[in-house]
Image: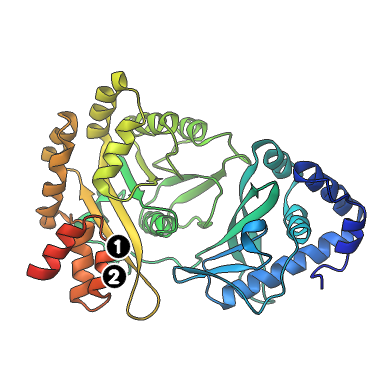
Amino acid sequence: MSNLSFIENIQANLPEMMIGTYRLKTINTMLNENPDWKKECYFNLKKLLRIMTSEEASDIDLGGPRTNGYIWFRVYGDKTPAQNIPKYKDDEVSAIILSILTIEQKEIFFKEKNLDFSITMYLEENEAPFRFRGDVFYERNTLAVNFRLINQDLFSMEDLQFPTPIVKRVNLKFEKSGLILITGITGSGKSSTLDSIINLNNTTNNAHIIIIGNPIEYIHQSQKSLVTHREVGEDVLSFGSGSIEALRQDPDIIVVGEMRDAKTISTVLEVTGSGHKVFSTLHTSSTVESIHRIIAEFPPDEQERIRFRLADTLKVVISQKLVPNRRGSLTLAKGILSINPSIQAAIRNNNISEIFQMITEGKNMGMFTLQQDLYRLVKTAEITPETAMNFANNRKIMHQLLKYG
């Protein structure tokens, strides 16, 4: 049984040996010739996303041989196939996704084999719209996609349990310049933390905040601050060019969605060095590793220059994970590095291995390691000792904390 009424019509006109981009482009042509098919695809996707939100899932995956035809949901960290939803044929998934992409987006996808995008959708009448981040890609010559729900409920810094010294450092009111990094693996809540920090500044400072995202996720309404959103691929060519262009747009805060490569990192350091407050994210699992990662992105003959620039501009590194709690949901665990003169000297002198101990002893500055925060969550009965061990970056240190406190 098919989920789309017209899928047999499409398959009847597609030879079985037609695969990959050629097959997708042929399906796309058929959709453009049949507006009613596009409308049916849209409502089918809306149905799936409605189920996703009702299941309190953070992600939905569909398409590709990987799925075995099932729709997969990630709920509180676990990804499982939905047994109560009919299976989807690959051509059905292709039709649904192609029907919602713009001409420009499809051109990018067919050229680069991957596309990040965002979509806003009203799932219920008289309710606020939901926003999703989509990633379309090929798997074994077949279209596949992941949608992630963009959280529309912002957390306060108190909700996230950030120490007062760190809340001050990320606030433009107390520090006008410097680089603040939010780091963690995919799905660790980096975007939610970043949006909370943006909201803190938006509601307390008369300023201009420029957000460069790929894609733009949460839309911040201008409050005390003027908030400008620029999406890579739609409004600006790249993170790097958006950062340079922002300097001519009278910013106080520049948000660079992700530091993906050496060119972007170099541009972010340059922009920060011009006296602006800059926020960005990085895919690393600890605060100290983030410093190593930034320096390692550059060839050896440039690393000393980058160390000195990083020592001058870096202010705070927040490294976080979402860990299962005793309530069956997820709790934020984090490590925080707050730069002081001793840490600056350690970065300049390439003594980065000394920084971990400085974090361990830096509680009065709002610093602590991930292991110390996991220990705090165990002591408050938020998580189990087993969870703390599973998510620690250093199991030996975690074991010592749990044993001796």
- Packing grade of label 1 (10 A; few <14, some 14-19, many >=20) is some
Secondary structure found at label 2:
helix
Residue 268 versus residue 68 in the image, above or below: above
Q: In which quarter of the image is residue 380?
A: bottom left
> Which residue carries the number 1 mark?
391
Q: Is residue 13 left or right of residue 237?
A: right
Q: In which quarter of the image is residue 321?
A: bottom left
Residue 387 shows which numbered tag? 2
Task: Tell me where residue 377 appears, x and y as whole percent.
Answer: 23, 71
The span from disc 1 to disc 2 (Cα, nearest Å) is 6 Å
Secondary structure found at label 1:
helix
* Amino acid type, label 2: Thr
Q: Which residue is drawn at 22% across and 33% down?
A: 311
Residue 150 shows which numbered tag? none
Task: Tell me where residue 119 appears, x and y as whole percent.
Answer: 64, 57
Q: Which residue is drawn at 75% across and 63% down?
A: 89
Tell me whether the residue at label 1 lies in contact with that at label 2, contact meaning CB atoms closer than 8 angstroms.
Answer: yes
| Front residue of this view, candidates 246 and 116 | 116
Q: In this view, does 137 lie to the left or right of 308?
A: right
Q: Quadrant of residue 296?
A: top left
Q: Residue at x 15, y 43 (%)?
A: 355
Residue 32 versus residue 310 in the image, above or below: below
| Front residue of this view, candidates 106 and 73 | 73
* Amino acid type, label 1: Phe
Q: In this view, does 212 lie to the left or right of 106?
A: left
Task: Tell me where residue 67 appears, x and y as whole percent.
Answer: 63, 62
Q: In which quarter of the image is the N terminus?
A: bottom right
Whether residue 30 appears in this view of the structure is yes
